[in-house]
Amino acid sequence: MKYTLYIPLLLGFVCLTGCGPEYPADWPKTHPCSITVTQAGQPQEGVTVVLARIENHGSWAVSGITNASGIAEIETSWTKAATKGAPEGTFTVTLSRAMPPFELSISDAELEAMPYDRRTAFIDAETTKARQKHQLPFALADPARAKVQIEVKPGTPATLSIEINDYL
């Protein structure tokens, strides 16, 4: 009877110790890192920033998403574990962003009045125009062509500002 009080306590302890994040054996020490993204001087919200280590790749991902001020606070993550900052090293920086919803240049009634073939061609042209307006330059978006790099070192926060129009 007196041991029945210890069973719930023991079960609670086992659950708490097993619920934390599991880090891989090669988990790195991280250092503060932030990247600011602007276009025509305006902060760009919702841009995904990915850092790819040039040498000694680990099993983790290093990335962030820009906030309303255009700043991505970089974090290192692996499955369910994440740590603020980036590991020491030199990284290639790539950017991506989802295309936001856009309005067609004509009304729904005008669109419905078009023959099917013409309507399809119109929608394709409008989508292509919106995609091109929103598309990032290859030097920022394509990992094989990326030209932007950042070096992360201990003791100094790594910061970088990227003006998208500089790469058009």
Image (cartoon, grey):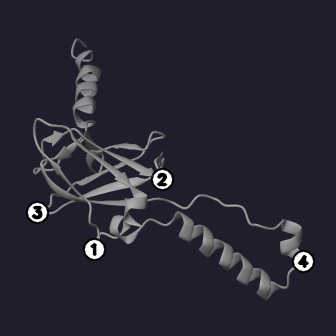
Mark 2 in CB contact with mark 3 (< 8 angstroms): no
Q: Which residue is disc 3 drawn over?
A: 55
The percent coordinates of residue 129 (x first, y second) are 61, 72
**Distance of label 4 from label 3 (alpha carbons):** 57 Å
| Disc 4 to disc 2: CB gap under 8 Å | no
Instruction: Kindly check if marks 1 and 2 are in contact, taking CB atoms under 8 A apart as contact.
Output: no
Residue drawn at x 22%, y 11% as measured from the top left: 2
Query: Which amino acid does the dot numbered 4 rest on?
Result: Ala
Give the CA distance from mark 1 to mark 3. 15 Å
| Distance Cα–Cα, label 2 vs label 3 | 33 Å
In the figure, 60 relative to 81: above or below? below
The label nearer to you, 4 versus 2, is: 2
Res 29 quadrant in image: top left
Q: Residue furthest top?
A: 2
Badge 1 amino acid:
Ala
Query: In the displayed structure, does residue 86 sit left or right of residue 167?
Result: left
Q: Is the residue under label 3 in contact with that under label 1 (CB below 8 Å)?
A: no
The residues tagged by marks 1 and 2 sit, at their Cα atoms, a distance apart of 25 Å
Q: Is residue 44 above or below residue 55?
A: above
The front one of 117 and 129 is 129
Location of the N terminus (image quadrant):
top left
Which residue type carries mark 3? Glu
Q: Disc number at residue 113?
A: 4
Residue annotated with mark 1: 144
SS state under label 1: loop
